[in-house]
Image: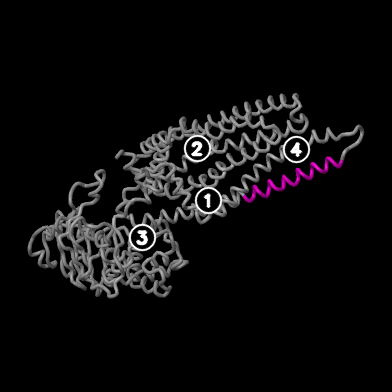
Amino acid sequence: MSTLEATVGPVSQASNWQVMRRLMGYMRPFNATMAVSLVARVTKITSQAALLGIAAASVGIYIEAAEPGVVNWDVIWTQVRWIAAVGTLVGLASYLENYTGHYVAFRILSELRDRFYYAMLPLAPARTAKLQSGDAVSRVMTDCERIEPFYAHTIAPAVAAVAVPTLLLSWCWTVEPSLVWVLLPFYVACVFLLPWLVAKLGGDGVHYRAQLGVLNAFVADSIQGVRDTVAFGYEQERARELRERGAAMQAGQDRLYGADAIQRALSEVFVTVGVLAATWWGIELALAGRINALTDLPAVIAVSIVGFYVSQGPANYYTDFRVAMIAARRLFGMMDQPPAVRDAGVPATVAAEPSLHFSRVSFEYDADDASWSRQRKVLDDFSLDIAPGRRVALVGPSGTGKSTLINLLLRQWDPQQGEIRIGSRPVTQFTLAELQQQFAVVSQRSFIFNETIAENIRMGRYEATQAEIEDAARQAGLHDWVRTLPKGYESPAGERGSKLSGGQRQRVAIARAVLKNAPIVLLDEATSSLDVETERSVLEALHRLCRGRTTLTIAHRLSTIVESDEILVMIDGRIAERGTHEALMRQGGWYARMFEIQQDEVDAKLAV
């Protein structure tokens, strides 16, 4: 796998035809509406050709009917009525085409975004962790938008490029059959030769879209990390890297759209030569008396010009079509990934006992992906039993598998070996929705959405009433502070909770967990990012949350778990020490040494 592929994630290798068939599948509910759009487009362009033909022939018709010194109003008004009627038809058909075409396109794009989001959910976080957030946004927004021309500007022009010239050539046949053989080669060249030329000159465009995803991801990183960039004086280096990535993307963009510019220039040459050929042959026919020089010849030239321009539709939109195919591949590449876990269970009729059991569990992250694998097992033949209502804490050096146990309980990954059970039931036999109801999670990085405080708490239980939200906030020690805000619970939390302090963010997370009222509580470094005094106040809320519930706590600060029923010290994926706080202190092992060091640090901070 290349560096670029590893950065931007998977891209579907399906052919254009396969991608087109899949995109057309999304259009199936709107086939009737799209058919109306196609008929309207053909009607519009044919009517435009008729309008020009009538206008061009009108002069000759008037001249043929002219009498010296007399204004022939009958002829004038007859032609004006024809022009007005056809012009009205052009306007109506144009409105119908644009409205129905974009109606279909925008609804399909909305459906694509929804399907992409729901396809991402079972991939998170095992698969999505490999995708940079900027590229994920690029796929769901930019790539979806780039697919829009396929529905709005590819299907209709392709149909019209064949249907309209066919109708116009049929009319030319009724005027003089030989005109068809003069015009046909130019129409064929415009419809087929020009798109082929764009394809040869413009490259496949895949690298350009991949580089665009890299650039979007880099910009997102730069914005999110601007504070550290400025603090370390790294602005110029970051700007240089941005220019390099922009130049790499621009090179592919230049090639893609340079070919499009060449095609459009050649199109004008084809039109000019085609019109000259039609004019030359028309004059020959007029001199031979085979067509009328005053009416037929101007109409043929006018109609042929419209035919030339409509036959260029596939070529004019071919670059957009190719970009749409590339964008669709990027979307489908993510959507088609197999989920890390499969929802194979069926809902239980009896609630599971809130006990946790790990039986000889072995696990390695990304074992099936050499480019991401860490090449070592995080857990190796790990076993653990936690009885209902017990409070168990996991401590140990970083990277020993503590958070991995929570990830496996939540089935964000599945172990390669062994079994995990809740009560007597393996977690793989729960539906994912049912499994989620077993746990309330408070982590170090609980995400706060850019919504109101009430909406952030309501994540715990969507149908909760305002009174229940306030009660959860009260138990989390948040209610009194919220009441001091001008908008109370309707106050915005800000992006990533930027309007809240660290302690307030954690209290919102605790309120969510209280509102969920799950039988098992998982605490993953829930206070590690807080100062000592804030930590103490948040711990009170956590103790209220965990009362009477099975609790598994991962902690960095050992002082926060001294009241646990049992403390497990994990080192290299195995349990190295276990017991109560007092028992572990008497053992004088890793736990005792780290507790003494941390106590010295706390005492030093409190003394300042």
Q: Earlier in the sequence, mark 2 or mark 3?
A: 2
Is label 3 or label 4 in front?
A: 4
Secondary structure under tag 4 reads helix
The residue nearer to you, when weighing 313 against 169, is: 169
Secondary structure under tag 1 reads helix
Real-space CA distance between mark 3 and mark 4, rounded to the nearest whole angstrom = 73 Å
Residue assigned mark 2: 319
Quadrant of the snapshot with the N terminus: top left
Residue 561 located left or right of residue 148: left
Q: Residues within 10 Å of mark 4 (few under 14, many from 20)?
A: some
The residue at the point 35 percent across, 59 percent down is: 447
- Give the magenta range: 73-96
The residue nearer to you, when weighing 584 against 424, is: 424
Q: Earlier in the sequence, mark 1 or mark 4?
A: 4
Secondary structure under tag 2 reads helix
Residue 100 located left or right of residue 5: right
The residue nearer to you, when weighing 230 against 409, is: 409
